[in-house]
Image (cartoon, coloured by chain):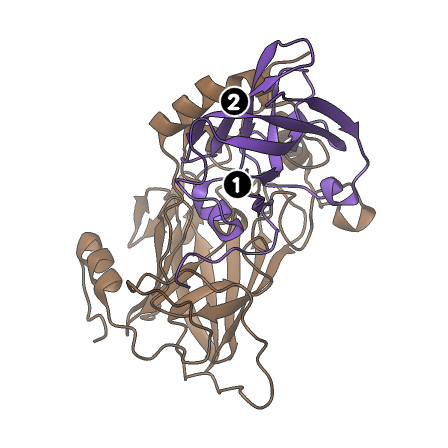
Amino acid sequence: MPLRGMVSTVALLMAVLACPVGTLAQNSGHGKSADGWPQPVWDQPPVTAQNRKAAPRRDLSGMWGPAGGHMAGVQAGGVLAKPNNGRPENQLPYTPYGLELYRSHKAAEGIDAVLPADNNDPRNNCEPLGVPRYNHYNVRLTQIFQDEAKVVILYHYDNRWRVIWTDGRKLPKVVDGGVEIDGELREQRIFGYSVGRWVDDDTLEVQTVGTLPEDRVWLDSTGRPISDHVRVTETLRRVDYDNLEWSETIDDPKVYTTPWQTMKLPMRLHDPHTDVMEYYCSPAEQDAYDKIFGSAASQKK
Amino acid sequence: MRGRLVIVLAVEVVMSAPLFAHHGSAAFDNGKAAILKGTVAQWVYSNPHCLLTVDVKGEDGTVVRWIAETQAPSIMYPAGYRKDSFKVGDQVTVNVEPVKNGLPIGRIREVVLADGTTLGGTNSVPIPPKGQ
């Protein structure tokens, strides 16, 4: 039963979680469980010419995971397309302000990583990562639901969900401090304002603007910056029934002199019955961890 | 059982790859390994990292309490780490990458249980759940 025009975000989330998934994969591998709680199968056999099935028209729904395995979407070393490893081909086109921002970020990962005691990643306080960083932080089982008006992505990390409107609404205009909708200044959002359009029967192009300012969010775990003037363009292309390609380009004139591609992540369809273990950021558990381990690990010699 | 602590210096190509870690790779002494043989004192199966506490008796009889972390439960589950993988008093051999500051803490690369079962790192061969 598809979702139908729900306006309540709470109702939406409850509905999508309860939505039957009968249209999903039959050949995506199936972890067995006597009690009906199958775990992810990360080593599914490859799709071949013999078992390849055509992609359903304009349908991205399903439970997806990085095709390269459960660690393939981690991106601790920086965004997939340009890991922050110091190589010339991965240097970014920073504006002077962007470079200043980067240098103010003390990351725990990447070529300029600092010791944990000096790390100022907003993630450490369980702050929301924002768009586009959710696409670059431990992407694992990722669920997509959709109806005639929207596509909803459920991220694994911190049980976050995001709405992409596909009903033809306009992408808001970015203005200082937020976006403009119907002549009004509207607030910046953690997930921004996302609209998608079908480029063809297999490809959804998504534009996102109106995200949080640069003092709240990072682009990736190596401290690369992102500003509230970014326009994020994603393409979700269903290559065939079992495969999806998730690409992303950012255009952020405040921070980067030119647009650049951050990600091209192949995703593989998983069995819709697959159990998804929680992976959340709890301040209480974080505090307990720091007392037992983290604080000692952070000490300098 | 008399425990032994052996510090092994080893250059491992795999350790040059960035690992996801809440506190980042910079805290750890990449390329070093500490092999700990000791007794489990605590096993915490929680976000953001699981924590295994092991008491290791040195040659002089002094007991050093080591704390070793893995990644979060959802990340380590495929590698076979369960809520009841370790019980207080279990004898284990733990291969950890220690931190740079010299304190007896590190992150787990591999654990060998008393029955010989080996639990590896994040990219180790998956250990399926019982009944799957």
Q: Which mark is residue A107?
A: none
Say which chain tag 2 marks: A
Extreme-bottom residue of the structure: A50
Q: Are marks 2 and 1 on the same chain?
A: yes
- In this rendering, position of residue A212 left or right of residue A185: right
Name which residue lies at 36% across and 44% down.
A189
- In this rendering, position of residue A91 left or right of residue A35: right
Q: Residues within 10 Å of mark 1 (few under 14, many from 20)?
A: many
Q: Position of residue A13 (x, y in %)?
A: 24, 56
Q: Is residue B83 above or below residue B97?
A: below
Q: Give the amino acid type for the residue marked by disc 1 in the picture.
A: Ser
- In this rendering, position of residue A41 left or right of residue A73: left
Image quadrant holding the C terminus of chain B, namely bottom left
Q: Is residue A118 visible?
A: yes
Say which chain tag 1 marks: A
The residue tagged 1 is A227
Displayed quadrant of residue A95: top right
Q: Position of residue B93 (x, y in %)?
A: 61, 33
Q: Secondary structure at mark 1?
A: loop
The residue tagged 2 is A294
Q: CA distance from mark 2 to mark 1?
A: 30 Å
| Nearer to the camera, A258 or A203 | A203
Displayed quadrant of residue A87: top right
Q: Give the amino acid type for the residue marked by disc 2 in the picture.
A: Gly
Image quadrant holding the N terminus of chain B, namely top right
Q: Is residue A172 visible?
A: no
Chain letter for the part of the structure drawn in brown? A
Q: Residues within 10 Å of mark 2 (few under 14, many from 20)?
A: many
| Nearer to the camera, A275 or A20 | A275
